[in-house]
């Protein structure tokens, strides 16, 4: 086990380093000359000025030296300055992250709380109406583009039926709670402001449901397939022969085994939530990383795009590492 | 709960109720056939768009801005007074083309690299598999977004960006499939006969391992179409006047009152993707009866 842990950790560290190289190369193979895009035409025609400017930003150095400088800055948490906001990219990311973490956590909980029971019921009552409903939900969840689903839900429940609050994290006239965690639900509860808590919760319902859709489909599908597999196993027959109650067989014996493959979905689910957040937050004017990503992409704000990609890649690596480790804990056979 | 679960294994008659022939056919092939129908219809629409469309896709009519669906404009008009029905038909071209190109090119490329890696073993395999690991350590759409932004906006560049993130899954699957085939006796026989490695891989191993690849390809076209539409939605796909479903939704994303602008292009994406998912599931059942109805 220790050996497995060390090798997984080393591998993740190497991958993180390599991903910085990928980002660096991407940022430095931009077809457009950074000199021209950063300096005005007049300044760019002055050769001395250009040379000075290049030296100032280290653009006259060979590529590998620039990569080392890039790494050094990275070690100090310097991801560059966003062109659009004129602020350090890392500051921007830190400011926008809590809104996304709050939204994504609720969506993740929703997709597990609905997806796992739905998948289990679908497998146990195979070919019944609940199986068909589960199938439909998971197919629609996987097939509907998130950005469109977000629009439809908003247009229907806010625009049409007017039973849900509109865009944003809280009402436009409300003031945000005093910031301790940046998560409005927790902050408002800490401040004892229950009206604001309800407001924040109401604003979370639509976007988190939309964001949960794709992940929910994936989890339902995998749980069902894996349950069906486990239900065929010999130990189920033994348990039945022993006269155990069916409910106990399913919940106590089949489910724990069937959930192991669902755990490996963690990385995939995270990637889903992240790309989903870009689309969902854009439609719901949710002031999180997703909308920041959208704005940076539209404005071609390079430092911001690269900074986000790097942060996302490292987080993704970390999540997959956690998934691998928990998988090894759940199923000791993978370590061997 | 107990009744349903036990009858599942103990009562074989329940799983095969007496159905008429037509109903049995529908049960087995209904969804895949429906998928094929949807896909073929969209392909026809895409091919015949200039003949079928009632308007020109870029025809701006400022007197008819944001008209709701009517007899003149079946699906309404957008903020520039362009006919949404027309743009939907032309949009099918880009979506189907990019979906097919991305998946086919990366499937061929990925399969070749994966197959060669599995057959050659050693350093080459190590190199290819580490590169796939590296690409797979980014969430696909985020990496594609960064690459598309670096290359500059345009359909071709976006396709290139998607290809970069798309091939590794095929390489991985192909490698594992070939590794299984490699240990089969017929491969040993081919080696003893003195066939060249290229011939063994291409003529013997790949055809035997191709089933799961076909399933992945079919299911993946829908995935690629959604991803391309997503990139277009972000403004990184097509250049604006070009009709494309993702960017059409993007244009209508703030028009909640004029719901038709964003709703119909999204429905188009949903229908195509569902079509490919139905077909892919059908092919999987057909190739691997064990996985039927999972």
Image (cartoon, coloured by chain):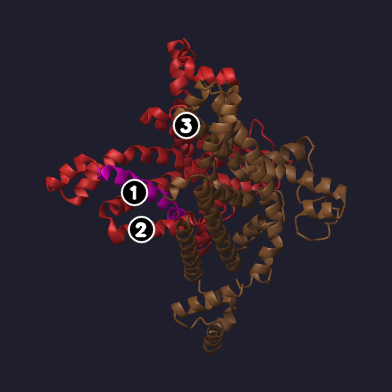
Chain colours: A brown, B red
Measure the alpha-carbon separation of dots 1 and 2. Answer: 10 Å
Name the magenta segment's main secondary structure.
helix
Q: Looking at the image, is mark 1 or mark 2 earlier in the sequence?
A: 2
Outermost residue on the front side: it is A242
Q: In this view, does A110 lie above or below A321?
A: above
A204 and B81: which is toward the camera: A204
Q: Is residue B90 left or right of residue B129?
A: right
- Location of mark 1 (residue): B175
The reply to whether dot 1 and dot 3 touch (C-beta < 8 Å) is: no
The reply to whether dot 1 and dot 2 touch (C-beta < 8 Å) is: yes
Does the magenta segment cover residue B4? Answer: no
Q: Where is residue A155 in the image (x, y as percent from the top left)?
A: 72, 40
Task: Name the secondary structure under disc 3.
Answer: helix
- Location of mark 3 (residue): A229
* Residue A311, quarter of the rendered image: bottom right
- Location of mark 2 (residue): B128
Look at the image and give the residue range highlighted in magenta.
B160-183
């Amino acid at each position: 086990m220790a050996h497995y842990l060390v090798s997984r950790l080393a591998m993740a560290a190497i991958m993180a380093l390599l991903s910085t190289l990928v980002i660096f190369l991407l940022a430095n193979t931009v077809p457009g000359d950074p000199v021209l895009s950063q300096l005005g035409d007049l300044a760019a025609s002055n050769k001395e000025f250009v040379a000075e400017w290049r030296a100032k930003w280290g653009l006259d150095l060979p590529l590998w030296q620039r990569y080392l400088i890039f790494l050094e800055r990275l070690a100090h948490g310097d991801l560059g300055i966003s062109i659009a906001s004129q602020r350090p990219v890392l500051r921007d990311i830190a400011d926008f992250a809590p809104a996304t973490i709050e939204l994504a956590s609720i969506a993740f909980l929703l997709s597990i709380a609905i997806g796992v029971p739905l998948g289990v019921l679908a497998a146990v009552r195979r070919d019944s109406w609940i199986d068909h409903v589960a199938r439909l939900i998971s197919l629609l969840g996987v097939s509907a583009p998130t950005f469109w689903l977000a629009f439809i839900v908003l247009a229907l429940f806010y625009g049409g039926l007017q039973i849900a609050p509109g865009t944003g994290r809280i009402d436009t006239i409300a003031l945000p709670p005093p910031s301790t965690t940046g998560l409005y639900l927790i902050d408002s509860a800490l401040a004892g402001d229950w009206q604001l808590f309800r407001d924040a919760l109401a604003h979370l319902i639509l976007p988190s449901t939309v964001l949960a859709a794709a992940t929910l489909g994936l989890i339902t599908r995998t749980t069902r397939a894996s349950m069906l597999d486990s239900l065929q196993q010999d130990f189920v027959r033994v348990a039945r022969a022993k006269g155990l109650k069916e409910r106990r067989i399913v919940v106590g014996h089949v489910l724990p085994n069937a959930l192991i493959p669902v755990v490996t979905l963690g990385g995939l689910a995270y990637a889903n939530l992240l790309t989903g957040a870009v689309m969902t937050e854009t439609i719901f004017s949710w002031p999180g990383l997703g909308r920041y990503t959208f704005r940076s992409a539209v404005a071609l704000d390079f430092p911001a795009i690269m900074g986000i990609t790097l942060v996302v890649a490292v987080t993704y690596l970390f999540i997959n590492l956690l998934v691998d480790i928990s998988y090894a804990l759940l199923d000791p056979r993978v370590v061997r | 709960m107990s009744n349903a679960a036990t009858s599942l294994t103990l009562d074989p008659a329940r799983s095969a109720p007496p159905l008429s022939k037509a109903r049995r056919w529908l049960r087995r092939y209904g969804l895949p056939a429906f998928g094929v129908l949807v896909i073929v219809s969209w392909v026809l629409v895409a091919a015949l768009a200039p003949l079928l469309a009632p308007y020109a896709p870029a025809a701006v009519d400022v007197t008819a801005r944001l008209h709701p669906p009517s007899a003149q404009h079946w699906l309404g008009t957008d903020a520039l007074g362009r006919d949404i029905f027309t743009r939907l038909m032309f949009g099918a071209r880009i979506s189907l083309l990019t979906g097919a190109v991305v998946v086919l090119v990366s499937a061929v490329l990925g399969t070749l690299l994966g197959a060669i890696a599995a057959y050659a073993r050693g350093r080459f395999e190590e190199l290819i598999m580490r590169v796939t690991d590296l690409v797979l350590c980014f969430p696909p759409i985020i990496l594609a977004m960064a690459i598309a932004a670096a290359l500059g906006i345009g359909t071709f560049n976006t396709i290139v960006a998607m290809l970069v993130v798309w091939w590794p899954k095929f390489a991985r699957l192909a490698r594992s499939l070939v590794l299984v085939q490699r240990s089969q006796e017929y491969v040993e026989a081919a080696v003893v006969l003195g066939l060249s490695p290229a011939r063994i891989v291409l003529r013997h191993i790949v055809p035997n391992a191709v089933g799961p690849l076909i399933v992945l390809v079919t299911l993946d076209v829908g995935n690629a179409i959604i991803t391309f539409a997503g990139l277009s939605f972000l403004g990184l796909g097509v250049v604006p006047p070009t009709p494309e479903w993702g960017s059409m939704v993007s244009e209508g994303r703030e028009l909640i009152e004029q719901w038709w602008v964003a709703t119909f292009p999204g429905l188009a994406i949903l229908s195509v993707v569902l079509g490919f998912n139905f077909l892919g599931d059908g092919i999987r059942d057909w190739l691997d009866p064990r996985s039927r109805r999972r």
